[in-house]
Image (cartoon, rainbow, N blue to C red):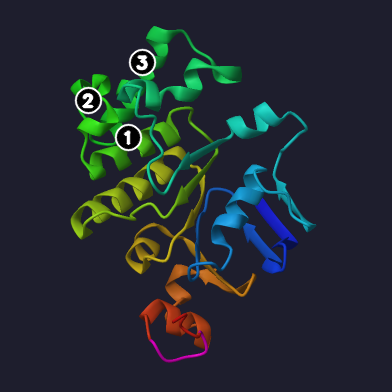
Amino acid sequence: MIRFDDVHKAFGPNRVLRGMTLEVPRGNSMVIIGGSGTGKSVALKCVLGLVTPDSGTITVEGADGDRDAFLARFGMLFQGGALFDSLPVWQNVAFRLLRGSLKRPKAEAREIAVEKLRRVGLSPDVADRLPAELSGGMQKRVGLARAIAADPEIIFFDEPTTGLDPIMAGVINELIREIVTEMGATAMTITHDMTSVRAVADRVAMLHDGRIRWTGPTGEMDASGDPYLDQFIHGRAEGPIAAVR
């Protein structure tokens, strides 16, 4: 569904992606792991067109030249929630359905928003609250409802459990797994939370030093034999990955 082919990206002297090559199969949940600053977020922004690679190609199956149509195929759960403080919850969820190429009548957009909120375990009365009135876990669920509001083919999850307690993180991981499976969507998640990896991934790719170091099914991760992956997934201080002090 998504293919990175020898993708390079630098910001001045800082070479972030140094030949990233990766395939994300259709209908699979791919999780990209790696330490902070390894280029995970840059890779995601390159797919969305927010950052232009210096060289190499990124292709999305079935993509054409219409940018609005291209972006309409995606949903995204942002790391910090990224909800609009001044809009009630339902308008946050239905944001894309109230404007642009996906525009629906207001009453229909609200109805869809309430249904998506229900799908992530939030009752209809939440729809008219403001984001500031919600807990962090509820805000994350609203962000997930917004990501799936337009029934996208591809969903991106940027550190989906950051800032959540272990129980709520487990709830979000379970919701992500269920929803991606139900929708038959292709998912691409970036995280360093190994609990999330094991909960939501069909396949795992480790990005290190701007390149994919290892990729394969989640079940083969523990016996990979790769010293970089082994150090990362077990959180060991000693190994080939130097800690930044």
Assess disc 1: are there few (<14), some (14-19) or many (≥20) residues with their C-alpha within 10 Å of its C-alpha.
many
Lateral position of residue 139 relative to residue 22, left or right? left
Label at residue 142: 1
| Residue numbers of the magenta segment | 237-241
Q: Mark 3–mark 2 contact, CB under 8 Å?
A: no
**In the image, what residue occupies the spot 51% across and 84% down?**
241
Callout 1: SS: helix
Assess disc 3: are there few (<14), some (14-19) or many (≥20) residues with their C-alpha within 10 Å of its C-alpha.
many
Lateral position of residue 160 relative to residue 100, left or right? left
**In the image, what residue occupies the spot 44% across and 36% down?**
147
User: Magenta stretch mostly in which secondary structure?
Assistant: loop
- Quick one: quadrant of the C terminus? bottom left
The residue identified by callout 3 is 110
Q: What's the residue type where badge 3 is placed?
A: Arg
Lateral position of residue 207 relative to residue 13, left or right? left
From the viewer's side, name the closer residue of 37 and 143.
Answer: 37
Callout 3: SS: helix
Q: Mark 2–mark 1 contact, CB under 8 Å?
A: yes
Q: CA distance from mark 1 to mark 3?
A: 14 Å
